[in-house]
Amino acid sequence: MMLTRRSLLATATAAGAMNMWDAPLKMAFANVPTEQRFVVVILRGALDGLAAVPAHGDPDYASVRGDLALQKTGNHPLLDLNGQFGLHPSLSGMKAMWDAKELTVLHNIGSAYHDRSHFDAQNILESGGKGPHVLSDGWLNRALKPMGLADGEGALAVASTPPLILDGKAKATSWMPAALPEPDAAFLARVRALYKHDATLASALDRAIATEAKAAAAMDDTPKSGMDMRMRAGYGDVTPLFSGAGTLLANAGGPRVAVLDVGGWDTHVNEGAGDGQLARRLRALDQGLVALKASLGPMWGKTAVLAVTEFGRTVAPNGSQGTDHGTAGAAFLLGGAVAGGAVMADWVGLKPAALQDGRDLPVRTDMRALFKAVLGDHMRVASRELEATIFPDSAEVLPLKGLFRA
């Protein structure tokens, strides 16, 4: 169920005609069985892994990346991690998490899909299948029941409707800041009067208003410049979305699982190196993740955040100073529950003979190994559920080890 002012207006208009209350809106999030929090950030559009996590210590890095190679000195220097890998200069907040041992970086990671279609690759990323369109629901939705969160009280999509990763038999709730005018007190009083003889509708309305108020309060605390940031749901400013989600997750009666969907990573033209369009997008993501940590407060220590993309991009730039669709890419695991400070990369180098089809980073780690590790070690999902229900036909993909604090 949608959880914004828009939903309140639509419900008030159509309550007498719609049969939408067979599955009533639940926003109490009470009595959920786990204290752990898990956030998935989908970087939709295929993030350039070598831009976000430059392999600056590789002897072929500078020559193969050309004008897109990040520099160790000068304007916009890369942020070194271990002498071999670094972070893009726009990711200073994530570098601070690395220094605090709250960030693990994964490279050469992806799925078994190599055909470079956004549509098919995103389907695999979200469904958890071995191939595109093999499974019709999302792996995180299938995990809700084993986590005890299948009744809609524990999973939140920061979107107008849940994306595929949260779509399926288990219920999930959606929340998104609306660009409609704030309903005034008189209007809400009339809606309450309309619902006063229906306990289900009245309770759902009160809970939706309360949850929206909590999220709005979080965004009201976010520094603003120019137009009201709550009205800016576009890619240029995602901080309100991350901050609002963190506030809801931090609440003792709040959700335990959340999904944020951040697009804008398809950089075929004028990608830029230390500065430019990709740098601005990475900076916005970095600020959003910092805001998520701040809004979670003490609950950050029980949180794991996965930032993943559907595939990587070509190692070498194209003729338009961008990068085309590739194969393997980079992923990030961060949070107070993470045993961070490591780069996990079965690195094979950047020479043409080591690349997928002579042009892409090859997949050396199956993304499902990362998903299984988070669900098993952090969210305490039994291995039999991981193999039989959540990621069927994946027995050969073993969970990664050592990702979380004891």
Image: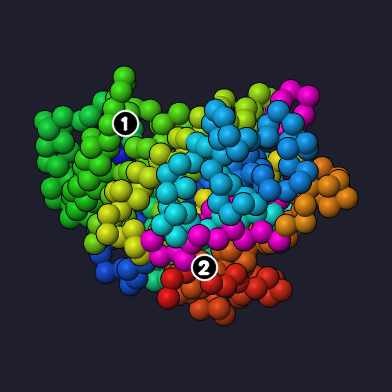
Residue marked by disc 2: 403
Q: Residue at x 52, y 68 (%)?
A: 403
Confirm whether residue 162 shows in the render.
no
Instruction: Name the amino acid type tagged 1.
Output: Arg
Location of the C terminus (image quadrant): bottom left
Decide which of tag 1 and tag 2 comes sooner along the chain: 1
Secondary structure state at the residue bearing disc 2: loop
Type of secondary structure dominating the magenta stretch = loop
Q: Residue at x 55, y 51 (%)?
A: 81
In the rendered structure, the answer to whether residue 149 lies left or right of residue 51 reads left
Label drawn at residue 230: 1
Picture coordinates of residue 302 (x, y %)?
A: 35, 64
Picture coordinates of residue 34 (x, y %)?
A: 34, 70
Which residue is at the front of the view, 282 or 155? 282
Which residue is at the front of the view, 274 or 316? 274
Q: CA distance from mark 1 to mark 2?
A: 35 Å
Disc 2 packing (10 Å; few <14; some 14–19; many ≥20): many
